[in-house]
Image (tube, helix red, strand yellow):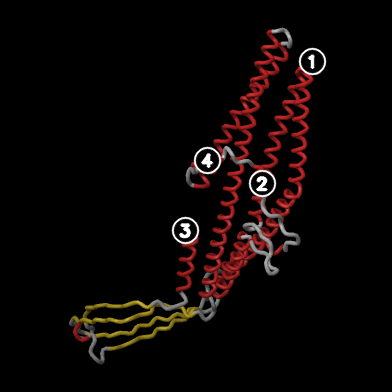
Amino acid sequence: LNIEQARAQFQIQRADLFPAVNGIASATRQPNTATGQYGNQFQVGLGVSAWEIDFFGRVRALKEQALAQYLATDEARKSAQISLVAAVAQGWFNLLADEELLDLSRRTLGTREESVKLTRLRLENGVSSELDNSQAESLAQTARATYAQQQRQRLQDENALVLLLGQQLPEDIRASLGQARLADAPAMPGLPAGLPSDLLTRRPDIRQAEQLLIGANANIGAARAAFFPRISLTAQAGTVSNELSGLFKSGSWAFSLAPQLTLPIFNAGANQANLESARAGREIAVAQYEKSIQTAFREVSDALAGQATLQEQLDAQRATRQADARRTELSDLRYRNGVASYLDFLDAQRSLYASEQTLVQTRLLQLQNQVTLYKVLGGGWSEPQQGTPRS
């Protein structure tokens, strides 16, 4: 809708380049100053009212400014579309992570409830102490609280995705959440080596800032032209008669031309202030254009830094999870054989649970970073064809 409004504004401004032709019909009854008798005059024709002949480019500059504003609005629409695509993808990955964390918390809660039952049974038979039972109960309640927290987060993330989609999740999509895993998410293609920096010029926000700069320059042209004379033309052509029946008879046709030149002499400095304002607006547009480019390089650099390090972090976290799983198995075996304390076993369980959570979160960060890279590169990338990269 913003684009449609900007297009209409451009068409309105462009129309000022052409004369507006109107149909005219009038009837006048007034006294004759010589005889004092009333007379009638009827007129039908075409007329052009105060059409500015654009000798100094004022109207053309305003048209260029309106066109630049329209193109900038269109780029803003593209930027919003890319942001929406990225937000939906990240929202979906959040839901997948929530499902994995919920499943992990559910299994952990079940395991710890079994541990509570086991330690209570061992306490009743004098094999373990009250301290072991209290520790097992504490871990079970902690897991229950974490499970409730993750259920709440899962519902909130789904609500956020529903807001982005503008509708409820389709049932087939909702049903697939239970089977989908972050590890199964398709990886985006790697960024080609030597990708030129002019790829950033495809970012809609940079092109938007460029169009706003073009519009600001056009505003200066319009403000400068206001110092020169304005030449406007008013013209009429038609038929005039004192009787309605004689309007279209021969000899009743007439025309008039009324050119007018307006030269600004004194307006208390308004024209100069308008010019200074337009120049300041151009400097603002230049600064915003430079800022958009600098921001783009910073965002791409951050995303590339994440791409370079998150895979290494993910591999290290997988190794940590495997080591914690092995440690838990050995601690359980040592505890059952009376070699280690129950506290050692519980500490190993806590470490395993934390490393499994961190593994899911790291994978989520990696996928979100890929989506961010797609966004900051103006909608993704692909292998270059015929020497020119394209998205």
Residue of label 4: 174
Would you place residue 249 above or below residue 225 in this image?
A: below
> Is residue 85 depicted above or below 44 in this figure?
above
Q: Name the residue carrying label 1.
A: 338
**Amino acid type of the residue tagged 1 in the rendering:** Gly
Q: Nearer the viewer, mark 2 or mark 3?
A: 2
Neighbour tally class for label 2: few under 14, some 14-19, many 20 plus, Cα within 10 Å: many
Considering depth in this image, is 47 or 79 the residue closer to the camera?
A: 79
Residue 6 left/right relative to 307: left
Q: Position of residue 200 (x, y in %)?
A: 67, 61
The reply to whether discs 2 and 3 touch (Cβ–Cβ < 8 Å) is no
The answer to which of marks 2 and 3 sits earlier in the sequence is 3
Circles 1 and 3, Cβ within 8 Å, touching? The answer is no
Residue 79 - label: none
Judging by the rendered image, the residue that carries numbered circle 3 is: 1
The amino acid marked with disc number 4 is Arg
Disc 4 secondary structure class: helix
Q: Nearer the observer, disc 4 or disc 2? A: 4
